[in-house]
Image: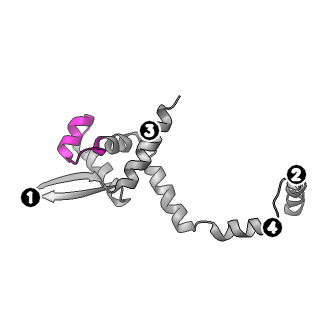
Amino acid sequence: MEEILSKTIQDQCDDTCHGTSNIDVLKEQLITDQIVGGLAEVFKALGDPTRLKIIHTLLNKELCVHDIVQVLGMGQSAISHQLRYLRNLRIVKRRKVGKTVYYSLDDEHIEQIFVQMLQHVKHS
């Protein structure tokens, strides 16, 4: 069955394929399963509306949990849980001053991803 499927696919693309040497190069350049897994986790994190709101809230300003709770109108437990999830993925980082913990985006890569996707969604 696999041989028949392979032959059918080959028959369909003979006119447009560039040969096996390009395939070999593409295979060598393929990202590892570990990197794919990491990317999938980040995109999974960005697939949650609450986490997106947190990221948007932190886009321009470092905030403590209490401030994020006030901005989003959600419970502290729920926000803390989401912040922990985002921190484990290195999407946000924390800074402790006395008993107060401040959160911000981990680096500009997260900001760039978020801003680019926001512009994409708003683009008509």
Disc 1 residue type (three-letter): Gly
The residue under the point 57% across, 67% down is: 33
Q: Which mark is residue 12?
A: 2
In the figure, is residue 93 to the left or right of 50? left
Crowding at mark 4 (Cα within 10 Å: few <14, some 14-19, many 20+): few
User: Residue 120 versus residue 92: which sits nearer the camera?
Assistant: 120
Element type at mark 2: helix
Question: In terms of sequence position, does the residue under pointer 1 or pointer 4 come before the other?
Answer: 4
> Are the residues at dot 4 and dot 2 in contact (C-beta closer than 8 Å)?
no
Q: Which mark is residue 20?
A: 4
Disc 2 residue type (three-letter): Gln
Q: Magenta span has 99? A: no
Disc 4 residue type (three-letter): Thr
Tell me the mark number nearer the camera, choosing from 1 and 3. 3
Q: CA distance from mark 4 to mark 2?
A: 15 Å
Where does residue 91 sit, x and y in percent of width and height? 36, 55
Element type at mark 3: helix
User: Residue 27 versus residue 6: which sits nearer the camera?
Assistant: 27
Q: Which residues are magenta?
A: 57-75
Crowding at mark 2 (Cα within 10 Å: few <14, some 14-19, many 20+): few
In the figure, is residue 77 to the left or right of 41? left
Q: Magenta span has 67? A: yes
Q: Which mark is residue 118?
A: 3
Disc 3 residue type (three-letter): Leu
Q: CA distance from mark 4 to mark 3?
A: 39 Å
Crowding at mark 3 (Cα within 10 Å: few <14, some 14-19, many 20+): few
User: Residue 65 versus residue 75: which sits nearer the camera?
Assistant: 65
Where does residue 3 sit, x and y in percent of width and height? 88, 63
Question: In terms of sequence position, does the residue under pointer 1 or pointer 2 come before the other?
Answer: 2
- Quadrant where the N terminus sits is bottom right
